[in-house]
Image (spheres, rainbow, N blue to C red):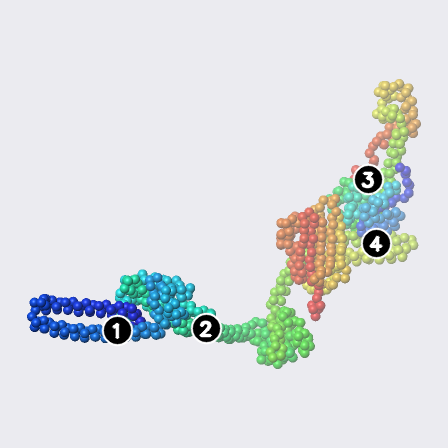
Amino acid sequence: MSINNSTPLVYLVDDEFAIRDSLTLLIESTGQTVRSFESAEAFLNNYTPDQPGCLLLDVRMPLMTGHELQSELLNRGINIPIIFISGHADIADSAKAFRSGAVDFLEKPFNNEVLLERINEAIKKDIAFREEFVKKRRIQDRIDHLTTREKEVLGLIVKSHSNKESAKILNISNRTVDVHRASIMEKMQAENVAELITMVMYCEAPNSSSLEERFH
Amino acid sequence: MSKSPDGHLNTESLDYKAEALLDKHREDIRKRAEIMLQHSGADIARMSTDDIQKLLFEFQVHQIELKMQNEELNRAHQELAASRDTYAQLYDSSPVGHLTLNDAGIIQKANMAAAALLGDSKEELINKRLGKFIHPSDQDNYYLFIHRLLAQKTGQALNAKTKDAENSPTHPECKYFQLCTDVPQPSDKSKILTYIECYARVVSNDKNTPQICLTINNITERKQAQETIAYLNEKLEEKVRRQTSELIVSNLSLMKKVEELRRSKHQLLEREAKLNSIFNASVEGIITINMSNIIVSANAAVETIFGYNPEELIGCRINKLIPSSPREMHDCSEPHSVKHIGQIQEVEGLHKNGFAVPLDLSIAEFSVDNAHYFTHIVRDVSIRKHREQQDKEHLDELAHVTRLGLMGEMASGIAHEVNQPLSAISSYTQVSLNLINAENPDLVNLTEVLYKTQQQALRAGRIIHRMREFVKSHAKHRSTADINSLIHEAVSLCIADLKQNGIKLTFELESNLPPIYVDHVQIEQVIINLLRNSIDALKTLPAKQQRQLAIHSRLTHDNSIQVRVKDNGPGLDTDQQQKILTPFYTTKADGMGMGLSISRSLIEAHEGTLHFNSQSGKGTTFYFILPIRRKSDEH
C-alpha cells in the first residue's frame, strides 16, 4: 500500500439534499474538499481508501441506514473516522454508534463551529492513524525480510535474552548468534538494540488511533 | 164359459171338459134307468099286462124324456162348439200375443198376434224354442224367468186354471215381465229390436206336465216412446241441470262481484278517509301544483312548515315556497322532462317570515284528463339536520382528539423533519457569514446561499403549518380537493417515520383524477392513520427483510376514487381481521385502538367506504373509496 499525500476528503452521506448542499458549502468554505452521497450504497460504490478523510453520516436513511453502513465499513476493514449527524438523536442511537467506533455524534441542527472542529480532529486522527499504520507497515516489511532463524533470534532479543542464552536456547554457537544479530540490526535499520526492541514492540502493539482511544 | 181378457182358456181344454160332462151325464142317465128298472118290477114275466102296459108307458115317457134330454144335450153341445169357435176366433184375432210353452220352453201353441210379433207364421213357430227369439242381452233374464216360473209355480198349476187367475193375488210372480226380441223386419234387413211384455202363468195339462201360458204385448213403441221420453227427459234434465249450474255459477260470480263492488266501494271510502286523514294529519307538507306551477291544493302541515295557511297558498306559484323547486327549473311546457320525479332531494324552502327551511322534497306526477299535476311532498328536516350536525360534530371532536393523539405519536418524527431544514439553515447562514467576512465578499454566491436559506426556512414553516393545521380544531368545511395532493401532504407528515424505519415508499398515483369534495384534514388523517398502521406493521419485520409500502390512487369503473395503502408486513390473522375495525381493538402495545374505527367513521361521513385485505405473512392492504363530486352537487 502506497502512501498518498493528497488533501484529505470529507465524505458526506445524507439523503436530504438541503443538508448535503448546505454542509458542502460550509465545509468547503473552510478549504476542505467534500464528496457527498445521497445514500450509503452510493458511498460504498465510490469510496477509495487511498486518501485520508472522515465521514459525515446521517443516521436515518431509506434502505441502508447510517448504522448499517458503519458495520459494513468495519466488515470491510475500512477505518475511516465517522461523525454521525442525526435529526433526532436518542441515547440508544448514539450509544450504538460510539460502541461501533464512531468518533462523534452530532444532533441537527448543530453548531457549525463544533462540526468543523470535529471534522478537523477526525481528519487529523485519520492522518495520524494512517502514518502510524504506514510506520508499522514499514517495520513489518523489514521483519518480513528476515530469515526464519533471524526471526527466532529477534524474538529472543526482544525478550531480553543475551547472545549466550540465545545460543544455548537455539543450540547454536555464540558466533553464529553474533552473525545473525548483525544481520538483523542491518535489515531492521536499527542503530542499537534498544531501538530494535522499540520498533518490534511498536509494531506488535494495537493501533493507537484505533477504537477505544478515539472516544474519551 | 167366459173368455178371460187374458185368454188362458183354450179350445182343447174346453172340448175336454164338455165331453167329460157329456159322458158323465150319459152314465148318470143309464144308471138311473137301470135303478128305475129294478124298482119297477124286477121281472117282466111275472108282471101283469097292466103292469107291463104301465111299464111300457113309463118306458115311452122315459124315452121321450131321454129324447128331450138328448136334444138338450145336443143343443148344449152346439152352443159349446159355437162358443169354442168364438173362443178360437178370439184367440187368434186377439191383438195380444198368446203362446203356450212346454216346460222345456218350446212353443206348443201360438196365436196370430204372437206369430206376427215373433215374425214367423203360427205353424212355423210350433216346436221352436222361444229362447231363440230372445235378444242375446235378455237371454239370461229370460231363462231365469222361465226357471223361476217353473220352480215356483208347479204346485199352483191348477189354480191357474181358474177364471180369474191373472187377477188372483195368489199369482203375484206371474205378473208383468219384460223381454226383448229381435225380429228381423221384412222390409229391411237391419234388425230392429222389438220390445215385448210377457205375462206368464204355469198350468198343468191333462198329462200333468206343466205348461207355460204366455201373454205377449208389443211394447216397442211404448218402449221407444218411453226411451225417447226418457232420453228427452234426460236431455232436458241435463240441460236444466247445466243451465241451473250455469245459473248458479253466474249467480255466484255476480254475488261475488256485488260483494267485491261493495268491498271496493268500502275500501275506496276507507281509503279516501284514510288519505284524507293522512293528507290532513301528515307532518309532511303536501302541495299539488298544475302544469303552470300554480298551487292547486295544500294540506295543513304546510302551515307549520312555511307559515302560510293552505287557503292563502291556492293560486300562488310554487316558487313562493320552494324557490329552487326542480319544477321551476324546467320548461313548464315539457312536463315529461322532469328528472326529479320519485327521488328525494334536499332543497331549501322559504318560510313566510323569510328564513330558510331545510327540506326533503319528493315529487310525484299524476294526470287527470290530460292535465298533469305534480304533488310535492316536503319534510322539514331542520331537526334531522341539527342531529346530523351534532353527530358530525361528535365525529369531528373525536377525530380531533385522535388527531392530537396521532400527532403525539408522530411528534418525534416531525421534529426530525423540522430539524432537517433548520440544520440546513444553520449551515447556510454560517456559509453566508463566512462569505460576508471575506475580504471580497462574493455577492452572487451569497445571494444564492441566502435564497437557499430562505427556502429551507419556508420549508420548516410549511411543516409546522401543516402540523398545526392537522392538529387544530379547525372550522369544519368541505371543499374540492385533489386526492393525490392529500396523499402527498399526509406522506410528508410521515416521511421521518418511513425513513427512520428504512421503509421504501412507492407511489402509484393516477394522474388527472376528478376532484373530490371533502374535509381535507380528515381525509389526510385517514391516510396518515393507514400509513402509520403500515409503518408499525413493517417495524416488526426482521431488519434484513425489505420493508415496502405503496400508495395507489385510481378512478374506479363506477366513478369513485379509490386509495390503497399496501404494505408487505406480517399481515393480520383471521381473528385480527374480524376485530381490526372495532373501536379500542389494537395489536400495538401502546395503541389506543381508535385509529381505524375513526378512519372508517370519517370515510363513511364522506359517503365512502373503508375496507382491507390481509394475508397473514404476506401483508395488508387498506383501501377506501370516496365518491367523486357530482355535477348535481354543484348548485
Q: Which mark is residue B80?
A: 1
Residue B385 vertical placement versus B551 (above, below): below
B495 sits left or right of B229 in the view: right
Q: Which mark is residue B478?
A: none
Disc 4 or disc 1, which is closer to the eye? 1
User: Badge 2 local density, few (<14 within 10 Å), some, or many (20+)?
Assistant: few
Residue B527: give x, y in percent of width and height: 71, 56
Cβ–Cβ below 8 Å for labels 4 and 1?
no
User: Badge 4 local density, few (<14 within 10 Å), some, or many (20+)?
Assistant: many
**Are the residues under marks 4 and 1 on the same chain?**
yes
* Residue A172 appears in the rendering: yes
Residue drawn where x is 87% and y is 21% of the image: A163
The front one of B92 and B117 is B92
Q: Chain of mark 2?
A: B
Q: Which mark is residue A76?
A: 3
* Residue A117 appears in the rendering: no
User: Badge 1 local density, few (<14 within 10 Å), some, or many (20+)?
Assistant: some
Q: CA distance from mark 3 to mark 1?
A: 174 Å
Residue A55 is drawn in which quadrant? top right
